[in-house]
Image (cartoon, rainbow, N blue to C red):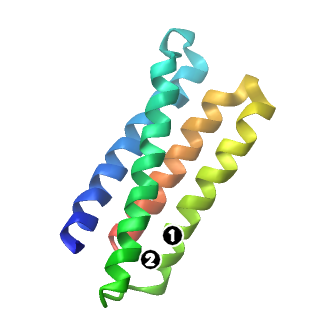
């Protein structure tokens, strides 16, 4: 389970980085906007939630980590909730919100990976 958590961490970092950059670029270039972009962002969120869930199982297995590691996992979940809840309210900035949110989650995942 611990190796799955480690591998999944890099998958989360890669997917949130790629979708974050794509969504941020789509704010300025309309040709990059598509349903595939939004679904890719949602997919990266599913991977993030899966990563946190696997982390909880690793913790229950007796492996401990730095307290900030747990906080970053919680904060990533909270960031997903905030970005998702604000999305309909700021349609004009939707892609920038998705991009910035995913890049923030990527930063959290990177920081947690190196604790």
Report how many numbered discs are placed on residues in the image: 2
Q: Disc 1 and disc 2: Cα gap in Å?
A: 5 Å
Residue farthest to the top? Answer: 31
Residue 3 is situated, as x and y percent measured from the top left of the image, at 19, 69
Secondary structure of residue under mark 2: helix
The image shows residue 112, relative to residue 23, as above or below, that is: below
Relative to residue 82, is residue 28 drawn left or right? left
Instruction: Please say whether residue 20 is visible from this viewpoint.
Output: no
| Label 1 close to label 2 by CB (< 8 Å) | yes
Q: In terms of image quadrants, where is residue 66?
A: bottom left
**In the rendered view of the protein, which quadrant contains the C terminus?**
bottom left
Residue 30 is situated, as x and y percent measured from the top left of the image, at 57, 11
Relative to residue 3, is residue 68 drawn left or right? right
Q: In terms of image quadrants, where is residue 7?
A: bottom left
Residue 51 is situated, as x and y percent measured from the top left of the image, at 38, 61
Residue farthest to the left? Answer: 3
**In the rendered view of the protein, which quadrant contains the N terminus?**
bottom left
Q: Residue at x 48, y 61 (%)?
A: 108
Relative to residue 48, is residue 58 drawn left or right? left
Q: Residue at x 54, y 52 (%)?
A: 104
Q: Which mark is residue 69?
A: 2
In front of the other: 90 or 77: 77
In front of the other: 30 or 76: 76
The residue indicated by pointer 1 is 72
Residue 80 is situated, as x and y percent measured from the top left of the image, at 59, 51
Q: Residues within 10 Å of mark 1 (few under 14, many from 20)?
A: many
């Amino acid at each position: 389970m611990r190796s799955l958590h480690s591998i999944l961490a890099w998958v989360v970092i890669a997917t949130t980085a790629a979708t974050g950059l794509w969504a941020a670029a789509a704010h300025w270039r309309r040709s990059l906007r598509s349903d595939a972009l939004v679904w890719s962002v949602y997919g990266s969120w599913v991977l993030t939630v899966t990563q946190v869930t696997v982390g909880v199982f690793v913790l229950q297995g007796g492996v401990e980590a730095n307290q900030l590691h747990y906080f970053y996992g919680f904060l990533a979940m909270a960031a997903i909730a905030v970005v998702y809840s604000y999305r309909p309210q700021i349609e004009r900035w939707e892609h920038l919100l998705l991009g910035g949110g995913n890049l923030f989650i990527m930063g959290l995942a990177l920081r947690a990976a190196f604790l």
